[in-house]
């Protein structure tokens, strides 16, 4: 299987979108559009060569739809060989897993470390400010508690209580 060494830019209108096993989640598309408008397309679309001068979307239908919603003329893509595309599409749809609350917390932490505010992170993610703050609080917990939270043994709703109990003088609780 070969891919282009670096993402390349192609016209969004040159990408054909086929059927997908997952239904399009409009709320997710809207959140992606807000994120792309704010930060750009972070993960290129994956395509394969199609008819002359055209490409067929292999992975990134929600990202594609968000880019179309933003009226982007060109997007970054990674071009894959035709032989590998069925496996790539299956992998993207089957192997995909929602992040755990700790995974979300780490992602939020990285955004905050890059200089985004709570409001900026909320806008980029399509979340409420309260949810971003809740996920950020997870990173304040001791590491053993984070691990228990990640396994699901400690419910996320206990995070606010645990943070406040460990820091009773914090006005943000």
Image: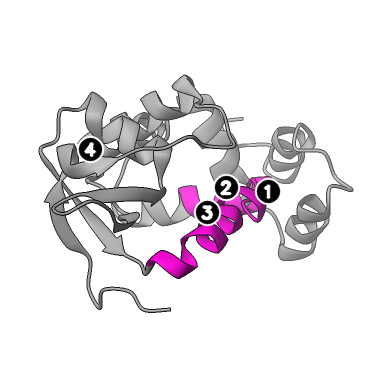
Q: Residue at x 40, y 46 (%)?
A: 60
Q: Which residue is mark 2?
A: 104
**Mark 4 to mark 2: distance in Å?**
19 Å
Label 4 with label 1: CB-CB less than 8 Å: no
Which structural element holds mark 4? helix
- Which badge, 3 or 2, is on the more N-terminal residue? 3
* Relative side of 45 to 98, left or right: left
Assess disc 2: are there few (<14), some (14-19) or many (≥20) residues with their C-alpha within 10 Å of its C-alpha: some
Question: Is there a contact, CB below 8 Å, between mark 3 and mark 4?
Answer: no
Q: Mark 3 or 1 closer to N-term? A: 3
Dominant secondary-structure state across the stretch colored magenta: helix
Q: Residue at x 82, y 38 (%)?
A: 155
Say left or right for 5 vs 143.
left
At 78% from the left edge and 50% from the top edge, which residue is drawn?
Answer: 149
Q: Position of residue 69 (x, y in %)?
A: 25, 24
Between the residue at mark 3 and the residue at mark 4, the CA separation in whole angstroms equals: 27 Å
| Residue position for label 4 | 38
Q: Quadrant of the C terminus?
A: top right
- The residue at which mark 3 appears reads as 89
- Tell me how far mark 4 sits from mark 1, CA to CA: 24 Å
Label placed on residue 100: 1
The answer to whether residue 140 is above or below residue 169 is below
The reply to whether discs 1 and 2 touch (Cβ–Cβ < 8 Å) is yes
Q: Which residues, given as a range, are shown in magenta?
A: 82-108
Residue sticking out furthest to the top? 26
């Amino acid at each position: 299987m070969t891919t282009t060494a670096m993402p390349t830019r192609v016209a969004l209108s040159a990408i054909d979108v086929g059927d997908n096993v997952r239904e399009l989640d409009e709320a997710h598309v809207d959140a992606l559009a807000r994120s792309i408008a704010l930060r750009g397309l972070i993960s290129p679309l994956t395509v394969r060569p199609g008819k002359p001068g055209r490409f067929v979307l292999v992975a990134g239908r929600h990202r594609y739809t968000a880019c179309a919603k933003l009226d982007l003329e060109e997007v970054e893509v990674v071009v894959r060989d035709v032989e590998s595309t069925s496996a790539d599409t299956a992998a993207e749809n089957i192997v995909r897993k929602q992040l755990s609350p700790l995974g979300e917390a780490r992602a939020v932490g990285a955004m905050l470390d890059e200089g985004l505010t709570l409001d900026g992170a909320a806008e980029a993610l399509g979340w409420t400010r309260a949810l971003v703050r809740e996920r950020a609080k997870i990173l304040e917990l001791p590491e053993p508690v984070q691990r228990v939270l990640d396994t699901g043994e400690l419910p996320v709703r206990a995070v606010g209580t645990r943070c406040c109990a460990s820091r009773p003088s914090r006005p943000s609780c």
